[in-house]
């Protein structure tokens, strides 16, 4: 049996503000509907993605901004960052982990060790290793996104 991630419910405080942000970031608007005064939804898809996000009023009890570590795979981290910045999105500088580990969501300066062996260093991975370079951004509520450069998939993907 195949299972594909299709949709992620994103907690936001203002549907119109979130919709404007994600459209500005280049996400495609698939649906925006005001069902009732207490139930509104917006469904958007990142460029090139098979999975989408949905948010709205009356959709989730999760705190706005509580979604963290939402990964967007890109083939060129610098190009993806430049495109988002060009669209008016505030994006961190490109960075990599100095230990070669999976980035797991801190937001800091040039080098920070989080006590779990991870250190964030400025610039893309020195060898541009697939899965090794990152940049981060947040929506207006603080939901945290990570761009991850993947140029070659691990076997079995």
Image (cartoon, grey):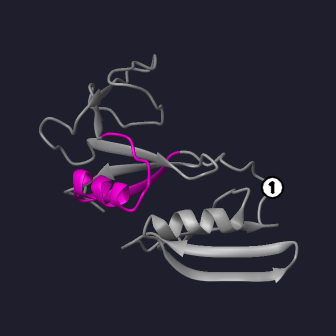
> Residue farthest to the left?
127
Specify whether residue 52 is in view: yes
Residue 127 image position (x, y, % from top left): 12, 39
Viewer-nearest residue: 50 or 57: 57
In the rendered view, would you say 127 is above or below 28? above
* Residue at (39, 20) in percent of width and height: 112
Q: Is residue 84 magenta?
A: yes
Q: Position of residue 8 (x, y in %)?
A: 60, 64
For the image, the number of numbered tags is 1
Kindly identify which residue carries mark 1: 61
The verdict on residue 13 being magenta is no
Question: Picture coordinates of residue 148 (x, y %)?
Answer: 33, 50
Residue numbers of the magenta segment: 69-93
**Residue sitting at 33 percent across and 59 percent down?**
86
Visible residue check, residue 5: no
Residue at image point 32% right, 24% down: 110
- Quadrant in which residue 96 is drawn: top left
Q: Is residue 7 above or below residue 138?
A: below
How far across and how far down the image is residue 117, in percent? 38, 20
């Amino acid at each position: 049996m195949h299972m594909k991630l299709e949709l992620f419910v994103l907690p936001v405080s203002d549907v119109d503000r979130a919709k404007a942000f994600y459209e500005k970031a280049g996400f495609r608007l698939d649906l925006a509907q005001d069902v009732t005064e207490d139930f509104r939804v917006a469904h958007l898809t990142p460029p090139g993605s098979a999975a989408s996000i949905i948010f709205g009023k009356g959709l989730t009890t999760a705190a706005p901004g509580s979604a963290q570590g939402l990964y967007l795979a890109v083939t060129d981290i610098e190009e993806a960052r430049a495109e988002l910045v060009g669209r008016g999105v505030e994006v961190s500088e490109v960075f990599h982990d100095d230990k070669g580990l999976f980035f797991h969501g801190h937001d800091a300066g040039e080098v920070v060790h989080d006590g779990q062996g991870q250190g964030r260093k400025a610039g893309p991975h020195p060898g541009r290793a697939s899965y090794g370079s990152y940049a981060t951004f947040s929506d207006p509520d603080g939901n945290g996104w990570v761009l991850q450069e993947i140029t070659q998939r691990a076997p079995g993907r």
